[in-house]
Amino acid sequence: MMHSAVLLKAEVKALQAANEQKKRRERKRKRQVASKTTRQVGSTGQQRRCGTCGNMGHNARSHNFHPIFHPPTCAIWAAILMLTSLSTNASGLWAGRFCLGFVEAAIAPGMSMIISMWYKRSEQTLRQVVWFMGNVTGGLCGGLLGYGIGHINSIAPWKALFLVFGGLTVFWSIFSWFLIPNSPVGAWFLEEEDQYKAIERVKDNLTGIKNSHVKFDQVREAFMDPKVWLLAAIQLTQNVPNGALGSFSSIVINGFGFSTLDTLLLQMAGFGFQGLFCIISAIGCTYLPNTRTYFMAFNTVMSLIGTIMIRQIDQKYIWGRFMGYCLTIIFSVKFPLILATITSNIAGFSKKVTVTAIVFIAYCAGNIIGPQIMFSREAPSYPSGFAGILVCFSCSTILIFVFRFYLIWENKKRDAAVGEPSQTIQSDEECISTSALNLLDKTDRDLPQFRYVL
């Protein structure tokens, strides 16, 4: 009996040792796969991020920007997306991703220009968030479509995704071509009298109307303005995490212990959190004056908490770490808030175009740097990468409050110099109304009655 018990105990230990060895081999295999995937995703993702440097070229021609060109840009992007599905090697895929990033670079600045033409400064945050919600909706629908298409065997699932989304974008581009007017003047859905009312209602913005001539004094002023560089620094520290998580989110979630197809569905929860905080921020900024920077900081702090959760929660608590991921990606809600800050606080068309270019260059730089901090040897947990993300969120929070205090100081300085903002300004011994002043294309520095939105 004792001999049998000893043998049984030895067999159990042998089985346990074999099972443990098998688990170690499986973990090693997963790390190798994740490491290889990290290199592939980082390389391919960076092609698209580098392509977004096309912002510089697109912003350079923004003086001749016409909203009617926006739908064709989306259609070109869709065509490139569908053609990318024909790629048979890495070089073709990289080229396609670069072209996608280059064309995509025109979308966000174009949307911001359209918003600034039509809406008051108090209305712009809500409208910027509404179009940004397209990202959230796309992520939610994309997760479901991706899960369904993932079961297709007749064609590679990624090719099917590119073809489906490309086709839908072409359809929407054609639809948008007939809907988006070139400017309030000539808008198909407004009577002639209402077209001029549309211009009149934004007179108090004092941010100017579109001007096709480059004013180099405004360009120079943009480079000398401290708040521009604060915005660029905020954008940079925001988009290092964006570049990292945008390319590696699937690997991170899969590394928590979820299957590949489950990862597609779980990413939808992250987009759901984004949507919720987008709505909270939009409503808050609209009905609580001068709170944009507070909501920017709030969203960043929530992301900082999420990053700490991913790093510090034990790996066996996969749902706790996943909740941390959902909180981490909330930082992206700052993107439309920053765009609204630019369109509301920068006057002068040439200056606004230059500032947009500077901020989007920071956006590109952050997205290019991001994948570099996700080291393949650390896949799929990426402790160093998340440490870098933590530092970026901390710096971003500090910069947001510095930016807010700078705007408060500027407003107080203007109040002390000229008093409360008036509806007229004295210029060359004549009194000019704000309605006429808005057409003169002056910068915020040249307008003593201009007050910055916080």
Image (cartoon, rainbow, N blue to C red):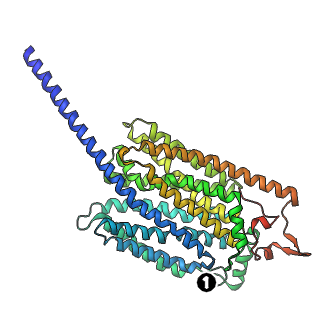
Residue projecting furthest to the top: 2
Q: Residue 427: x and y, percent?
A: 87, 73
Question: Is 373 on the left or on the right of 400, as rendered?
Answer: left
Q: Secondary structure at mark 1?
A: loop
Q: Quadrant of residue 129?
A: bottom right
| Above or below, 325 relative to 444 | above
Residue at point 56% right, 80% down?
Answer: 68
Residue at point 61% right, 73% down?
Answer: 114
Q: Residue 176: x and y, percent?
A: 51, 77
Please name the amino acid that badge 1 sits on. Trp
| Residue nearest the observer in this picture, 298 or 84 | 84
Res 257 seen here = yes
Residue projecting furthest to the right: 429
Q: Which residue is mark 1?
A: 188
Q: Residue 364: x and y, percent?
A: 52, 61
In the rendered image, the quadrant that contains the N terminus is top left
Res 277 seen here = no
Q: Residues within 10 Å of mark 1 (few under 14, many from 20)?
A: some
Q: Quadrant of residue 41?
A: bottom left
Question: Is 96 on the left or on the right of 326, as rendered?
Answer: left
In the rendered image, the quadrant that contains the C terminus is bottom right
Residue at point 69% right, 54% down?
Answer: 288
| Residue nearest the observer in this picture, 212 or 163 | 212
| Above or below, 143 relative to 211 | above
Q: Quadrant of residue 264?
A: bottom left
Q: Residue 414: x and y, percent?
A: 83, 58
